[in-house]
Amino acid sequence: MTGQERSEEKSECVSLSPMMEAVPAPPESERVCVFGTGDMGRSLGLRLLQAGYGVVFGSRRPHSSSSLIPHGAQVLGHAAASQSAHLIFIAVQREHYDFLVPLANQLKGKVLVDLSNNLRKNQYPEANAEYLQSLVPGAEVVKGFNTLSAWSLQNGPSDANRQVYICGESVEAKQAVIAVAIKLGFSALDQGFLSVARELEDFPLQLFPQWRLPLRIAIGLSAAFFFYLLIRDIIYAYVTQSKDISFRIMVSLANKVCPIVSLIMLSLCYLPGVLASFLQLYRGTKYRRFPDWLDRWMLCRKQLGLLALGFAFLHVLYTLIIPIRYYVRFKATERTVSVIRENRTTQFDTTTAWRGDSYLSLGILGFGLYVLLGITSLPSVINTLSWREFSFIQSKLGHLTLLLCTAHTYLYGWNRFLSSSTYKWYTPPGYMLCLVLPSVVLLLKLLHTHTQNNTLSVMTALSLRGWLPFNHRLPCFWDQKPTITFN
Amino acid sequence: MTGQERSEEKSECVSLSPMMEAVPAPPESERVCVFGTGDMGRSLGLRLLQAGYGVVFGSRRPHSSSSLIPHGAQVLGHAAASQSAHLIFIAVQREHYDFLVPLANQLKGKVLVDLSNNLRKNQYPEANAEYLQSLVPGAEVVKGFNTLSAWSLQNGPSDANRQVYICGESVEAKQAVIAVAIKLGFSALDQGFLSVARELEDFPLQLFPQWRLPLRIAIGLSAAFFFYLLIRDIIYAYVTQSKDISFRIMVSLANKVCPIVSLIMLSLCYLPGVLASFLQLYRGTKYRRFPDWLDRWMLCRKQLGLLALGFAFLHVLYTLIIPIRYYVRFKATERTVSVIRENRTTQFDTTTAWRGDSYLSLGILGFGLYVLLGITSLPSVINTLSWREFSFIQSKLGHLTLLLCTAHTYLYGWNRFLSSSTYKWYTPPGYMLCLVLPSVVLLLKLLHTHTQNNTLSVMTALSLRGWLPFNHRLPCFWDQKPTITFN
Amino acid sequence: MTGQERSEEKSECVSLSPMMEAVPAPPESERVCVFGTGDMGRSLGLRLLQAGYGVVFGSRRPHSSSSLIPHGAQVLGHAAASQSAHLIFIAVQREHYDFLVPLANQLKGKVLVDLSNNLRKNQYPEANAEYLQSLVPGAEVVKGFNTLSAWSLQNGPSDANRQVYICGESVEAKQAVIAVAIKLGFSALDQGFLSVARELEDFPLQLFPQWRLPLRIAIGLSAAFFFYLLIRDIIYAYVTQSKDISFRIMVSLANKVCPIVSLIMLSLCYLPGVLASFLQLYRGTKYRRFPDWLDRWMLCRKQLGLLALGFAFLHVLYTLIIPIRYYVRFKATERTVSVIRENRTTQFDTTTAWRGDSYLSLGILGFGLYVLLGITSLPSVINTLSWREFSFIQSKLGHLTLLLCTAHTYLYGWNRFLSSSTYKWYTPPGYMLCLVLPSVVLLLKLLHTHTQNNTLSVMTALSLRGWLPFNHRLPCFWDQKPTITFN
């Protein structure tokens, strides 16, 4: 932010360039080489310069490139450049790697950092870094820095892109790369040998891998309930009363599908936690792994919850525009007119008022908590919470939200549960169907809390779960489980 | 995120394990020992391995544990393991510390890092770290890393959990631990001697310490106004007109309590800043400490403001559902019917339209700014603001929000302030009561801005306050004050 | 957060102070000196102590200052203090720099870090750091740390304020300062020679430099459309029908201006990306710089988008309160009454219902996506996204939002486009004017996607743009472009 302002005004910097080169060169250990003068190479070079390294660019056309590179850096031909440093960043696309073959001799013993990425998964038979190693067998190839963009290199590391993943065969080579990463402000994670390179190269190609299952569930549920309600509401009216109320698809139907999907997904978000607790109670230990399907389910609770919040948000908007709708305004006028013309008297019903207001109030409070859960799942907010606070919000407040939303739906149904006219074509309305799962989750949760309190003395380990950093096999309601497995 | 994907697909990693051990062991200074193979121990061990350390686990049953520990690490018995490194992380629960007593000799001169936490405050007479020191008097005990969860160790440091707090008697021991912390990507803060250990052990047990006072104020105000309005509205109607309008509790009453509490809390959020300014003017210096109650009040302004935003959000929802309510729809029909039956003509009143629309518009703009204040108080957004920008938003826009919301409430009252029918049982309505505080705050602020401008030449120090990093004794409207005191 | 709790309870710390001084002093290389015992000096000193440095304060009145400084630090006179360390932080305001002149001899060869800031831009003829250098010519002056507040020094580095910018003539001096910054948990960026100091000193005085252009556009558009609609709606009614409908300014007019400005600004946010793509297609290369006006435009897309979201939010609120308005309720009653009195029958029109509901539904979905775009532009959320994910959301979902909102506006117009009564005084209504730009952007985008697919084989470079870290000259729809230029 501030950097931009600076760069816009920086004019005296141009004159610094010649002076910079007059400065005595840093020792070889503090000098690195960058092959390639594209965006990535130049951004990396600038960052290296700013961290105090001497930087020598290697280029095919050193003379024409010299205008492109950041001030304070040198450009030489590849062969000459490679002699000036022990560590060489290869910021070149894989297709052009063959220029390295004639340099194989000069590169012997050097550490080559492969920064390249591909355009799609499985584009080449082997990882770029392995290919590079095969071209220059005498060098120590380290894969790394490829998950960073030129943008994040220029703007400096922040939160999630502070981590640099590296892999390679040589421990010494990796330690040299780690040292550079730390000096640039990154934190390096050694992922193992060069065979992991392919995985590292697939990272930047990911498109929401964790959101896929929750999105599929959301789309599946929406489609199922849409067609169910289409048949029950619109087609039923057309078949039995020959009325065309298809316009209801746009708002009324949408406003039925949204809350139904939202409530089901919210309970799906809390069901695996309850299941896991029971599994642990049944097994009598918290130290055995969960079955894979449960693990995968627990890993996507956050996404399930956020999608549920999205549907709840749409439900709120669809509800609030009700009085603006032409249909609703038309009906209101029609009702008043009919009261007058038929000379009826209307009677205020306190029970209906109580029920309606309670229904709305529960919905509002439930949505308020829903939004609170959403806000506390923002990465920067999570980070300010202690473990116990996070667990309190996501578990206690989460189940309270589920309770309020379920009660809101029960009040919506009210006495229609027993009326036979509700069951058109012998099918229950959507809100009844969607009440099954949350009711089960709340019941199980109640049961489990009860059971757990009784067995507390026997199974201390279990009761410790969830809120101590030190004991948290099952801590994360709604959030991600530890990501690394120990095979 | 990306790490999970990897772990799910990582199968070739299994084969790396034997090769890893073939790698020549790092020197002793680069080798650390971890006692305990639980979640915390394994997560820490993995992180250490990834940062390039050699890791030796100490375990009671080294053979059965070897399948649990991360690849590349060794497992030995406790005695053997302790010989391999100078630094030993004790990732074991306090109850099992007695296994260290027979090792006291081997541990002499070693640095023991106590990572343990307790289940509740004051669980034991002395801090775990002090207990550990008493068991192994010859070792240098350092308390630290206990505020991290295994989860944050595996996912890497981020924002708020980048800081590791340590304490201990030996400066050298602490420096060794700090060096490891930095290499793992954390930033270590030396908190002093081992007597601070108890405080560090209480950290993860905190449950919103800063939210308690604001929450109590919010609950107290809500309860007080709820009963006040219950008596004034519902009980009054029941006693004087024998009408049962109790159904209004759910929405009407809630929609009176919410805005009242919101406005009072918003002014409570800005009152201490104004008081502090006057105190400084009165004292003639900005270099004296504020009284304790004012300090504590200023420390919870952010929480006061966010709770006020929450109540405002509920008020908006409660207001927007008004036209959907049964009662409101019933009344509308009744009114229209009575117009017809009594053959009245209705007259459009432009003043009422102006007042009503202005009232709504001010409310909308006030709420918009309210939300903006909320968004800019998100940790990650604060971090992108310069000091002057933050101060501008929280002070200038904050007072503007208060002004808009206060004007919104005055317009709500309008001419009812003078009508005697407003004062049922001689009590003023709720919105009048809640106008007192914000009016006072706005007046004082106006007065202070005026005074300050006049005395600017005399008291330069004061006028500098608030927007320069270098001069900010009183900088933080709405946000936290510096947290460490210099006694 | 946790730190505060601690400091409030820390009482035993007082007793630590004398013991701390008994500890053997660290070697000179690990000792630093701080001149000045104000907020900044003390915060910096405390942080240095916590990171393991020995700290010696220099003060005019060492005896009276000793009660102010953090425990574990020493206070000496300036001359004595300067002898104890190689690195001296000058945490003093520029006006008091003259006390350094008599120390010039002692300071010869020392590294002086200038932390000062000014009250306004161009307050002094030369930068504070350059002035300092002129006073103490024998010392190595490094400008730095001035962008940090005492607050961020005490609370530790986080996200955006992790970076410390430094500049100075001597490479060795800068490396010494960088080393300290890294140990304190910051990441240092060398910005060049001391001539850059002025820019660094202007940083903390910035007030939303990036928001200025977007805010001016927003205010300009709002004012223009406000007056246009004022004339067309209110003055037109007054002139032609002598009706005073001025009360409409507060809600009706505001609710026309908000969506119009929102839609125009959303298209302004996507227009430069489309223009840039065409420019690259036309030029046949992605390696040439864009013209300056396009660069500046692309740099403020995020701000344009967020302001557009703000206007959309107000539009939603203004729309949702429609049924609560006095005018609307009055009209509804009047309509019903006239139906009765004139004994008309009302006919339900399915087309109107379809149109109205579709219009509302598109608006809701558009606003939902709008909010999603806003959430994903939060700094902490951006950081969790891979490059491809970010680009997917901001480009694909962004254009979808624009499409939905444009369709929403077309449906609002519906058949009024052709009715001559729409064109009062021969002017088109506001919503028609605002449809021009989004229609053009969507058309160009469609055209470009089509063209690009056809020329894919020829211009691989272009097709790679936007989602690979390695190839992203044109990556950032809606977000910031790389901030540093290579002249």
Image: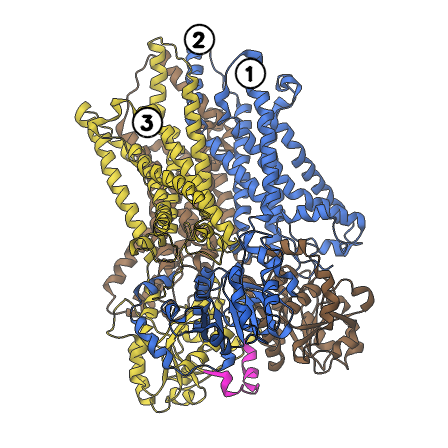
Chain colours: A brown, B yellow, C blue
| Residue where numbered disc 1 is placed | C237
The reply to whether the magenta stretch includes residue B17 is yes
* Quadrant placement of the N terminus of chain A: bottom right
Are the residues flagged by discs 2 and 3 from a single subunit?
no
| Residue where numbered disc 3 is placed | B327
Magenta residues, as a range? B14-32
Q: Report whether residue A441 is seen.
A: no
Residue nearer the viewer, A330 or B41? B41
Quadrant of the image occupied by residue B439: top left
Residue nearer the viewer, B261 or A207? B261
Relative to A404, residue A280 above or below: below
Residue nearer the viewer, A44 or B148? A44
Disc 1 and disc 2: Cα gap in Å? Answer: 29 Å
Earlier in the chain: of badge 1 and badge 2, it is 1
Q: Position of residue B361 (x, y in %)?
A: 45, 31
At mark 2, the secondary structure is loop
On residue C343, which mark appears? 2
Q: Position of residue A388 (x, y in %)?
A: 35, 61
Chain ID for label 2?
Answer: C
Around disc 1, counting alpha carbons within 10 Å, would you say few (fewer than 14), some (14 to 19), or many (20 or more)?
A: some
Relative to B83, residue C465 above or below: above
